[in-house]
């Protein structure tokens, strides 16, 4: 007798990735594809985010294809296309999306993205009844996943999104490597780190040895700037090797003495279809003000895509597999309009489905760094945040060379 245990025989799942790439996207695609195809889904990849559902459509079959989830970026490619009318593109392209879902017979849509991509998916679910599952991703870690973090009797609402663990490790490595140059020249290096309006990612620099940090959540007014320079002076002069690493989020709001305004430094005036401008360049301004005001040699370095690129790290690999287990559960129950999340922050060995839950996509939104994670009076991340990061980072060891040679006095 022939058995057929496939639950969703004949149904098709379409997967797309939108927004900035992360090292964990291919791992997310592969993990979801593997589970969905076991359930009997045909699995299609929609290329270039929502763009792949416009016009004639741009769809590939992933069902039985070899797929390397360790390789960073997204094999489905990405875009910041918004199907709904926006300032940049007032056309409503939802009818094209609906037509292509019908034409390619896509029954369920899985959107891997941040608040923009999943916000659009949520709208399609609510207004058009499209069966949608959102899958979190962002190196900025600013998507509200309602993940709890317990530390010394406190319960903190935190966030963990695939892509962030790999990016935070990349940020740590980038920062750590700069130390030898800072030491060799007795310099201050201001390291600029991506993250848009949130300071989560800059925490990776602290793990890489940066002594101070500035984040977008606390704007640097004229008064705070004076305090910051005092702290920089003290930290530099008291450092054994006369050097200092300062992490600066790209979205820091910095007081501009010329116009008296506190604002972000923009890399360009262009905005994307979700209305986001590009940030960049604040590190150069801060480094040159340090040199002018304190007289110490300072340089700016931008981590940029170093954080965002390259292979998927171990924690992300397992996190995406764990969240994909939850996706399988949602598919089996036909629960749509949901996003799988980690319910509490756990270390690598505890990344298992019983530590996940799902949240209503209507409740997803942006979340910046909780106040418990940063001490603005010291311009430093707190031990509470370092504890949170330790779940992701595991134990980190760097080589050290504590030289202090005796000075020779000629007689
Ligand atoms: O949202 C991810 C992110 O890398 C942000 O940290 C950064 O501001 C932005 O994307 C830059 O995007 P792109 O260079 O792709 O325009």
Image (tube, rainbow, N blue to C red):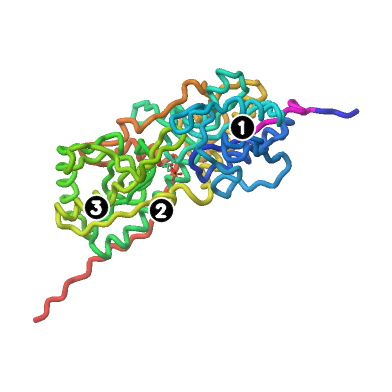
At x 34% / y 38%, what residue is drawn? 199
Q: Is residue 243 left or right of residue 79?
A: left
Q: Note whether 354 is above or below 65 in the view shown.
A: above
Decide which of tag 3 and tag 1 comes sooner along the chain.
3
**Does residue 355 appear in this view?**
no
Q: Is residue 69 left or right of residue 395?
A: right
> Which residue bears the numbered disc 3?
287
- Mark 3 surroundings: few (<14), some (14-19) or many (≥20) residues within 10 A: many
- The percent coordinates of residue 305 (x first, y second) are 44, 50
Q: Quadrant of ligand 1?
A: top left
| In the foreground, 109 or 181 | 109
Marking on residue 173: 2
Q: Check disc 2 and report its element: helix, strand or loop.
A: helix
For the stretch drawn in magenta, the main secondary structure is: loop
Quadrant of the image for the C terminus?
bottom left
> Which residue bears the numbered disc 1?
325
- The percent coordinates of residue 218 (x first, y second) are 26, 35
At x 72% / y 34%, what residue is drawn? 42
Q: Are marks 3 and 1 in contact (CB under 8 Å)?
A: no
Of tags 2 and 3, the one toward the viewer is: 3
| In the foreground, 174 or 22 | 22
| In the foreground, 31 or 131 | 131
- How much space separates mark 1 and mark 2, taking CA atoms? 30 Å
- In magenta, the rendered stretch is 5-14
- How much space separates mark 2 and mark 3, taking CA atoms? 21 Å
Q: Check disc 3 and report its element: helix, strand or loop.
A: helix
Q: Note whether 236 is above or below 317 in the view shown.
A: below
**Quadrant of the rendered image containing residue 253:** top left
Taking the magenta stretch, the answer to whether it contains residue 7 is yes
- The percent coordinates of residue 232 (x first, y second) are 19, 49
- How much space separates mark 3 and mark 1, taking CA atoms? 46 Å
């Amino acid at each position: 007798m022939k058995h057929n245990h496939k639950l969703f025989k004949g149904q098709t799942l379409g997967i797309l990735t939108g927004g900035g790439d992360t090292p964990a996207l291919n791992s997310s695609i592969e993990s979801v594809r593997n589970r969905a195809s076991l359930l009997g889904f045909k699995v299609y990849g929609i290329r270039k985010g929502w763009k792949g559902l416009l016009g004639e459509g741009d769809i590939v079959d992933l069902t039985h294809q070899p797929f390397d989830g360790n390789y960073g970026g997204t094999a489905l490619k990405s875009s910041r296309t918004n199907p709904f009318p926006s300032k940049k593109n007032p056309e409503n392209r939802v009818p094209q999306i609906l037509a292509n879902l019908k034409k390619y017979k896509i029954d369920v849509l899985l959107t891997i993205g941040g608040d923009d991509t999943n916000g659009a998916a949520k709208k399609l679910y609510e207004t058009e009844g499209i069966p949608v599952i959102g899958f979190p991703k962002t190196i900025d870690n600013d998507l509200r996943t309602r993940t709890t973090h317990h530390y010394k009797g406190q319960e903190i609402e935190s966030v963990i999104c695939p892509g962030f663990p790999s990016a935070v490790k990349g940020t740590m490595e980038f920062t750590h490597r700069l130390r030898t140059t800072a030491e060799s020249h007795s310099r201050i290096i201001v390291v600029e780190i991506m993250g848009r309006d949130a300071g989560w990612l800059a925490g990776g620099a602290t793990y890489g040895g940066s002594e101070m940090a500035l984040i977008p959540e606390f704007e640097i007014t004229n008064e705070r700037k004076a305090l910051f320079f005092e702290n920089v002076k003290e930290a530099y002069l008291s450092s054994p090797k006369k050097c200092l690493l300062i992490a600066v989020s790209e979205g820091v709001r910095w007081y501009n003495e010329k116009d008296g305004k506190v604002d972000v430094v923009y890399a360009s005036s262009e905005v994307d279809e979700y209305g986001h401008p590009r940030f960049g360049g604040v590190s150069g301004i801060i480094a040159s003000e340090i040199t002018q005001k304190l007289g110490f040699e300072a340089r700016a370095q931008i981590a940029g895509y170093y954080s965002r690129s390259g292979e998927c790290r171990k924690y992300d690999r397992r996190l995406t597999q764990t969240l994909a287990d939850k996706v399988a559960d949602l598919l089996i129950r036909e629960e749509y309009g949901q996003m799988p999340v980690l319910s509490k922050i756990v270390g690598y060995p505890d990344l298992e489905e019983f530590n996940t839950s799902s949240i209503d996509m209507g409740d997803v939104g942006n979340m910046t760094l909780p106040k418990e994670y940063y001490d603005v009076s010291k311009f430093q991340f707190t031990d509470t945040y370092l504890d949170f990061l330790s779940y992701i980072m595991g134990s980190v060891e760097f080589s050290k060379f504590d030289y202090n040679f005796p000075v020779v006095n000629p007689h």
